[in-house]
Image: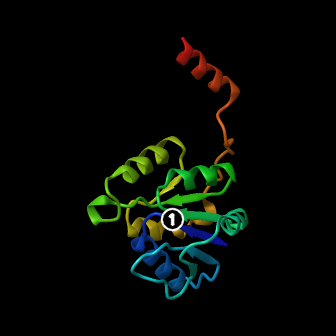
């Protein structure tokens, strides 16, 4: 199952609409989306507006891949769970966010962590076609290593 998530703060109709159209055109019945409170609802893919945390964790763990907004929490969760992830940043210029921080996040993490990034609907459709080929990034831990924590502590306390 491909899990689509837009987070809990803002809707992301552009992402959901594009995935819904792609799934319908490719007869992909294995897509489930958490869509938030947007102004548009999918006509093909299964969805919920919001999912309680235990159910979301279950869905996340059982997903074969994650498609999401460029939220750092979702990206880190995918890396902790060793899930391939494709992100599409919300754009302030389209009224989807208050500033362009998701564009910056997507650009840097795409370069640094090599997560899949689609900057527009056309690129999202293209990358969805190859989602099963996305590499799984090495697992990250939930907390910084003891060495890093010690170095930070030593720096702060001088």
Query: Looking at this rendering, what residue extends furthest in the top direction?
Result: 158
Residue labelled with disc 1: 8
In the foreground, 82 or 58: 58
Does residue 68 appear to the left or right of 52 in the view shown?
left
Residue 56, image quadrant? bottom right
Q: Residues within 10 Å of mark 1 (few under 14, many from 20)?
A: few
Give the residue furthest to the bottom.
43
Q: Residue at x 57, y 78 (%)?
A: 48
Q: Position of residue 124 (x, y in %)?
A: 45, 67
Q: Quadrant of residue 74?
A: bottom right
The colour scheme applied to this rendered structure is rainbow
Q: Residue at x 58, y 58 (%)?
A: 85
Tell me where residue 143 appears, x and y as whole percent.
66, 38
Front residue of this view, candidates 81 and 9: 9
Q: Secondary structure at mark 1?
A: loop
- Horizontal and vertical percent position of residue 112: 50, 41
* Residue 96 placement, left or right of 93: right
Quarter containing the C terminus? top right
Q: Residue at x 59, y 63 (%)?
A: 66
User: Residue at the location (63% across, 26% down)?
Assistant: 149
Q: Quadrant of the N terminus?
A: bottom right
Name the residue at the left extreme.
93
Front in this rendered view, residue 1 or 154:
154
Residue 41 vertical position relative to residue 11 in the rendered view, above or below: below
Tell how many labels: 1
Quadrant hosting residue 133: bottom right
């Amino acid at each position: 199952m491909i899990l689509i998530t837009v987070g809990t703060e803002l809707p992301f109709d552009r992402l959901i609409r594009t995935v819904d159209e792609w799934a319908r055109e490719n007869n992909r019945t294995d897509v489930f989306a958490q869509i938030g409170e947007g102004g548009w609802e999918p006509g093909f893919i299964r969805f919920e507006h919001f999912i309680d945390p235990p159910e979301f964790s279950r869905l996340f763990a059982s997903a074969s891949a994650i498609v999401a907004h460029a939220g750092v929490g979702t990206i880190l969760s995918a890396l902790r769970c060793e899930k391939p992830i494709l992100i599409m940043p919300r754009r302030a210029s389209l009224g989807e966010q208050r500033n362009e921080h998701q564009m910056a996040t997507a650009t840097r993490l795409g370069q640094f962590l090599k997560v899949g990034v689609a900057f527009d609907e056309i690129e999202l459709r293209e990358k969805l076609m190859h989602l099963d080929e996305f590499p799984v990034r090495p697992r990250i831990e939930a907390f910084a290593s003891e060495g890093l924590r010690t170095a930070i502590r030593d720096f702060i306390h001088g």
